Amino acid sequence: MEKVLAKWWEPTDNQKILCTLCPRYCKIGDGQPGFCYIRQNHGGNLYTIGYGKPTGFAIDPIEKKPLNHFLPGTSILSFGTAGCNLGCKFCQNWSMSKAKLDDMNSLTVSPEGVVELAKSYNTPSIAFTYNDPTIFGEYVIDISKISREEGIKSVMVTAGYIDKEARKDVYKFIDAANVDLKGFTEKFYWKSTISHLDDVLDTLIWLKNDTDVWFEITTLLIPDENDSEEEIKRESNWILTNLGDSIPLHFTAFHPDFKMLNKERTPEKTLITARNIATEMGIKFCYVGNVHNKEGQTTYCPNCKAILIKRDWHSVISNKMSSGCCKSCGYKIDGVFNN
Ligand code: SF4
């Protein structure tokens, strides 16, 4: 595949290129990559060298993204590329996000080829995931446009660190997203991810107010870093005030990885405490992840408390929804449901 010219950039006065895809706004010299590695200046043009270069495909349960209120119990064709626009010290997927394309033996697959693959595996949706799909936005747009025509849904699994203008293009044909809200202090964001909290909050508000994208939020809780009760309360309060009470919130367990090997795995008790706080404050759908905890992974009807969807880890054990509503009392559950 030919090198693909990138969108979202402009030349600067000093022979560099300003990439305007994400709030990092890299200034990139000739022959150099941006922070995310897969956007590169060659001869005064910016190229997206991740275009058409997945590192491989998997068929995942959609609960793994995690999405609990979007086509529950279905499979999703999932892929990412090399590179990432964040610098998370705790990255749980760093072999891909920190890799160069050559290290990954990347495949070459056209947008049509990705959609054909989803059709051949009969998955109702495609996930752009593993690294942050923001950085291969051009490929996302081309795939999601075709997949919408074919009746296949598209899902972003992202940190939400994207420019205000570029996001209007990247999310044009997106149906759902899981956004990592990595913590709730600017100090943690900058120190541990080299990005800014306010930009992510702005994306969440935009998704809620200006798009039809169904989205859920995930916070990976890291011991003594972003797991204090006070921080969970402030995060929950912000969600309730700015996004309402119906956006599912997932608290997931960290395992020591990449540059955070000195930390313990998140105790299950921390996740349960966080879930209890968020639920007591009024968040209707709060889940725990990366542990076996049936109660924390079950969807309950907020009205009559009936069990609607029972899960264990990423598996759906039973589903008692009816046309997107509680079978017992008829209460409408927020989300996109297949029964
Ligand atoms: S998308 Fe990549 S090159 Fe562009 S500003 Fe963000 S990190 Fe830099």
Image (tube, rainbow, N blue to C red):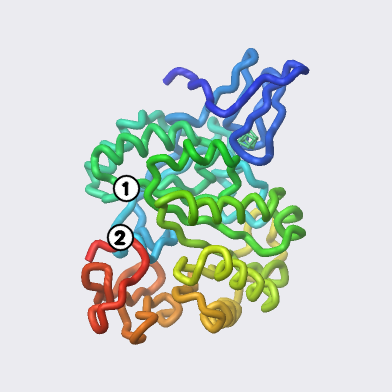
- Ligand 1 resides in the quarter of the picture at top right
Where's residue 33, x and y in %? 65, 28
Where's residue 253, x and y in %? 56, 69
Where's residue 101, x and y in %? 54, 32
Looking at the rendered structure, the secondary structure element under dot 2 is loop
| Left or right for 228, reference 312 | right
Q: Quadrant of residue 330?
A: bottom left
Where's residue 156, x and y in %? 45, 48
What label sits on residue 153 in the rendered view?
A: 1
Residue that lies at the very extreme toward the top in this rendered image: 43
Looking at the rendered structure, the secondary structure element under dot 1 is strand
Q: Mark 1–mark 2 contact, CB under 8 Å?
A: yes
Report the front residue among 24 and 191.
24
| Left or right for 160, reference 247 | right
Residue sitting at x 77%, y 18%: 14
What label sits on residue 290 in the rendered view?
A: none
CB of mark 1 near ligand 1 (< 8 Å):
no
Residue sitting at x 56%, y 80%: 281
Q: Can residue 290 be seen in this view?
A: no
Residue sitting at x 45%, y 76%: 284
Q: Name the residue under label 2.
A: 71
Q: Quadrant of residue 52?
A: top left
Q: Which quadrant, please, contains the N terminus?
A: top left
Q: From what the image shows, is residue 26 above or below residue 57?
A: above
Q: Earlier in the sequence, mark 1 or mark 2?
A: 2
Decide: few, some or many residues near mark 2? Use Cα within 10 Å; few <14, some 14-19, many ≥20.
some
